[in-house]
Image (cartoon, rainbow, N blue to C red):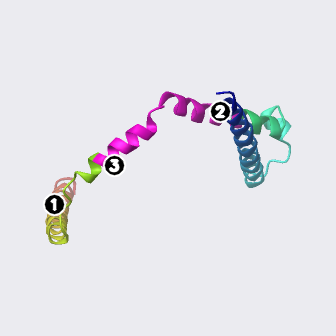
Amino acid sequence: MNTQKNVIIILFIYTLIWFIWIFERLISDLLEFFNINNINAYLFCDQSKVSIIISIIVFSIIASFIIIYKNTRKFIDESSVEISKIIWPNLKIVRNLTFHVLSFCFGIAFVLGLLDIIFIKLAQFIYG
């Protein structure tokens, strides 16, 4: 149990360093993009502090997600079993249904286009 705790602490530190590096790069790229030369004038703190704060927030969100969903592996296994039970349609059925859906969409688009033209002509006739 103690080694598992040590591994989690090491992973936390490694991930935190990685997030700090990513967000520091992101912030510097954003500052360069918006032509901001003095970060202290805009954020009232330096770039590394902002990166650390953002990194801690992101890591906390990820860690809480992992803690909340302990049974993620069980869920994935059960989902894959359920997906394997699905009877997938063959290519002929897929093509046939795709043709029907596209035909319906184009038909509705044609009818709505005609109604649009009719109402535009009617509005031009009335308001002239």
Q: Mark 1 or mark 2: which comes first in sequence?
A: 2
Q: Which one is closest to the eye, mark 1 or mark 2?
A: 2
Name the residue beneath numbered marker 1: 108
Which badge, 1 or 3, is on the more N-terminal residue?
3
The answer to which quarter of the image holds residue 51 is top right
Amino acid type indicated by mark 1: Ile
The residue sitting at 17% across, 59% down in the picture is 112
In x, y percent, where is residue 41? 84, 36
Image coordinates of residue 77 in percent, x first then y, are 37, 44
CA distance for labels 1 and 2 = 60 Å
Whether the residues at callouts 1 and 3 have beta carbons within 8 Å, the answer is no
What's under tag 3, amino acid-wise? Answer: Ser
**Whole-Å distance between the Cαs marked 2 and 3?**
28 Å
Q: Residues within 10 Å of mark 1 (few under 14, many from 20)?
A: few
Residue 55: quarter of image: top right
Residue hosting label 3: 80
Query: With 124 as the anchor, is 48 left or right in this view?
Result: right
Q: Residue at x 63, y 36 (%)?
A: 58
Which quadrant does the C terminus fall into?
bottom left
Residue positioned 18% across, 67% down in the render: 90
* Amino acid found under the numbered disc labelled 2: Gln
